[in-house]
Image: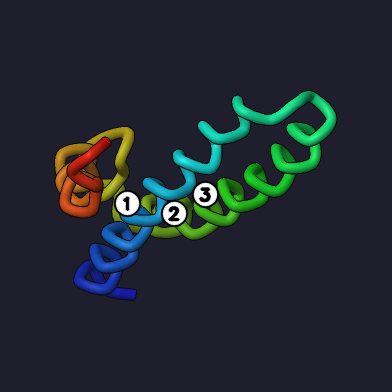
C-alpha cells in the first residue's frame, strides 16, 4: 500500500466512524437486556474499524487520527457529517 491508497482508506474509515458512532449512541435507548446483545455487535464493528486502521497508521504514522493525522482525519470526517447533527 502506498500513501495515496492509505489516505483513501483513512477517508473511508473517517466516513465509517459516523454511522458507527450513531449506532453506539442508539444503545442508550435500549433496555438492559437488549443493550448487551447489540453492544456486542456494535463492538465488533468498532473492532473491525480498528483492525483496518492500525496497520495503516503503523506504516504511515502521519495519518494517525490520534496524532499527526488528526487534522486530515477530522477534515475527512467533517466532509461526510450530515448537516443536521
Whichever of callouts 3 and 1 sits on the residue coming sooner in the sequence is 1
Say which residue appears at 63% left-offset and 45% top-offset: 42
Splitting the image into 4 quarters, where does residue 78 fall? Answer: top left
Mark-to-mark CA distance, 3 and 1: 11 Å
Q: Residues within 10 Å of mark 1 (few under 14, many from 20)?
A: many
Please report contact status of discs 2 and 3: CB closer than 8 Å, yes or no. yes
In percent of width and height, residue 59 lies at: 36, 57
Q: Quadrant of the N terminus?
A: bottom left
Mark 2 and mark 3: span between their CA atoms?
Answer: 5 Å
Query: Mark 2 or mark 1, which is nearer the start of the sequence?
Result: 1
Residue 15, image x, y percentages: 32, 55
The residue that label 2 is drawn on is 53
Relative to 51, is 28 above or below?
above
Q: Secondary structure at mark 2?
A: helix
Residue name at image x 72 percent, y 42 percent: 38
Q: Which residue is mark 1?
A: 14
10 Å neighbourhood of mark 3: few (<14), some, or many (≥20)?
Answer: few
Image height check: is 3 above or below 80?
Answer: below
Q: CA distance from mark 1 to mark 2?
A: 10 Å
Compared across the picture, whether 56 is left or right of 65 comes to right
Which picture quadrant has residue 16? Answer: bottom left
Amino acid at each position: 500500500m502506498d500513501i495515496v491508497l492509505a489516505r483513501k482508506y483513512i477517508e473511508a474509515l473517517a466516513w465509517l466512524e459516523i454511522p458507527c458512532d450513531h449506532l453506539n449512541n442508539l444503545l442508550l435507548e435500549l433496555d438492559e437486556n437488549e443493550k448487551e446483545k447489540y453492544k456486542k455487535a456494535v463492538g465488533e464493528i468498532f473492532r473491525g474499524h480498528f483492525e483496518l486502521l492500525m496497520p495503516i497508521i503503523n506504516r504511515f504514522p502521519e495519518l494517525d487520527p490520534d496524532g499527526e493525522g488528526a487534522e486530515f482525519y477530522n477534515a475527512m470526517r467533517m466532509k461526510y457529517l450530515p448537516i443536521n447533527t
